[in-house]
Image (cartoon, grey):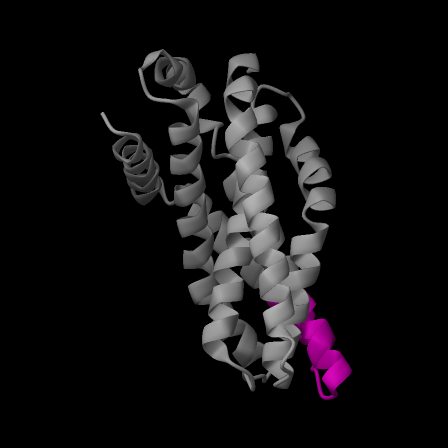
Amino acid sequence: MSYWTTAMRIVAKDLLSEARTREMTNAMLFFALLVLVLFSFSFQPASDEERRLASGVLWIAFLFAGMGVLDRSFWRERVNDCLDALRLTPASASALFVGKCVANALFLLLAAVILVPLFLVFFDLSFRGDVRAWLLVLVLGTWGLVVNGTFFAAMTTNVRSRELLLPLLLLPISVPALVAVVEATAAALLGEGAMRVWIQVLIAFDVIYTTLALLLFETVVEGT
């Protein structure tokens, strides 16, 4: 079985499992929607500075909603020792990691498709800048969050307080990506031309941490 066939089968397994239960998707969307509604009652952005703050609200909602998806990405594999069974197959650990990352990224991008229009409606905003460039920012930012989140989820899957430990590990290391996506979103909302710099930051972040995760994931899996 080829590397990518293995990865795509992991993706298909996770998508099918979620389609049957909708457990993670419903919880993720409900939590993110709740954050947006609460913040929309708190303030309505009128000035450019408030619009810049609103971009942070979007990514806060997106980030904390994604925590539930990332936290449970390997928790399912603990049932009936599925993770041990996967480790006994000839498939490489990195193929398992890539499959998990792609599945988690698809879950989060699905949430973004729903949340972003609601965000624009609740806060009475619109994109004044290059929407296509911002969509690239969304994909790059999501991948950066997913790579690190999936890696740390595997590392903490057998830890009793994993729900607390995962954010403590993920949030500090994700600060450069979060700054980049918030600033790029603010640039898209305000019509500024600074997105190119932040896209370069996100590409560098994704390349560095994807490479490190692929190199270290087998060691992490063997230790779980």
**What segment is highlighted magenta in the picture?**
36-56
Image quarter where the N terminus lies is top left
Residue 55 among magenta residues: yes
Residue at the location (66% across, 66% down)? 182
Residue at the location (58% across, 34% down)? 212
Vertical comparison of 53 with 28: above or below: below
Image quarter where the C terminus lies is top right
Q: Is residue 123 visible?
A: no
Whether residue 100 sits left or right of residue 7 in the image: it is right
Q: Quadrant of residue 47?
A: bottom right
Vertical comparison of 173 with 156: above or below: below
- Residue closest to the eye, 3 or 144: 3
Query: Residue 220: horizontal and vertical position, in percent?
Result: 56, 21
Q: Is residue 25 visible?
A: yes
Residue 197 among magenta residues: no
Query: Residue 17: horizontal and vertical position, in percent?
Result: 32, 36
- Residue closest to the eye, 27 or 131: 131
Magenta residues: mostly which secondary structure?
helix
Residue at the location (42% across, 36% down)? 98
What is the tally of numbered marks visible in this picture? 0
Residue that sits furthest to the left in the current view: 1
Query: Residue 204: horizontal and vertical position, in percent?
Result: 60, 52
Query: Residue 214: horizontal and vertical position, in percent?
Result: 50, 32
Vertical comparison of 100 with 199: above or below: above
Q: Quadrant of residue 33?
A: bottom right
Residue at the location (35% across, 37% down)? 14
Vertical comparison of 207 with 17: above or below: below
